[in-house]
Structure formats: structure tokens, C-alpha cells
Amino acid sequence: MGALSWWHWAIVLVVLVVLFGSKKLPEAARGLGRSMRIFKSEMAEMTKDGDKDKTHVDVQAPHELTTSDPDVDVNVTVSDETKKSA
């Protein structure tokens, strides 16, 4: 049970022609070719976009908020309306 010989492929071809007809097979092959071309171009575009994103990344250090930060007000007042709704 190795590879298929030439007469196996001939039987497969005859079955395909009988099932789908001689007119549908070239149309199906053409459609498959178009789909593969579109898929390849989209994959190339995604790869190109991914490479572009990697080269243009601006790395900034995150700003940590600490209680010693003078710009941050950590005192929170709760109004009476908030107490009633809770």
C-alpha cells in the first residue's frame, strides 16, 4: 500500500469527470487557483504589516502611581446619595 500508480490516478480522474462533468472541473480549478492567489496575497500583506509594526514600536516606560506621588489624590469622599444607593 504505497504510492498510487498511474492507473489509480486514471480511475480517480474518470470518477471526477463522471461526478462533476467536464465543464465544471476547469471552473472549479480556476476558482481554486483564484482562492489560493488571494490567500497568498493576504498572508504576504499580514506578514508585511506585522514587520512594519515591529519596526515602528515606540516603547515608553509605564508611569506607576504610588501614594508618594504628589499629583495623585488618594482621598475619596463618598456622598450621601452613593451611600443610599449601595
Image: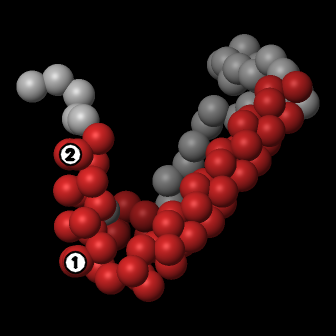
- Asked whether residue 31 is in view, the answer is yes
Checking the image for residue 19, the label placed there is 1
Q: Could you say whether the residue bearing mark 1 is in a helix, strand or loop?
A: helix
- The residue closer to the viewer here, 15 or 50, is 15
The amino acid beneath tag 1 is Leu
**x 42%, y 74%: residue:** 25
**x 17%, y 23%: residue:** 2
Q: Is residue 8 above or below residue 79?
A: above
The amino acid beneath tag 2 is His
Q: Is residue 42 above or below residue 84?
A: above
Crowd band around label 1 with a 10 angstrom C-alpha radius: few (<14), some (14–19), many (20+): few
Q: Is residue 27 left or right of residue 43?
A: left
| Disc 1/disc 2 C-alpha distance (Å) | 17 Å
Q: Quadrant of residue 1?
A: top left
Q: Earlier in the sequence, mark 1 or mark 2?
A: 2
Q: Position of residue 10 (x, y in %)?
A: 27, 54
Q: Is residue 29 left or right of residue 61?
A: left
Q: Could you say whether the residue bearing mark 2 is in a helix, strand or loop?
A: helix
Q: Position of residue 56 (x, y in %)?
A: 90, 30
- The residue closer to the viewer here, 42 or 21, is 21
- The residue closer to the viewer here, 52 or 2, is 2
- Asked whether residue 71 is in view, the answer is no
Q: Quadrant of residue 71?
A: top right
Residue bearing mark 2 = 8
**x 25%, y 66%: residue:** 14
Count of labels shown? Answer: 2
- The residue closer to the viewer here, 72 or 47, is 47
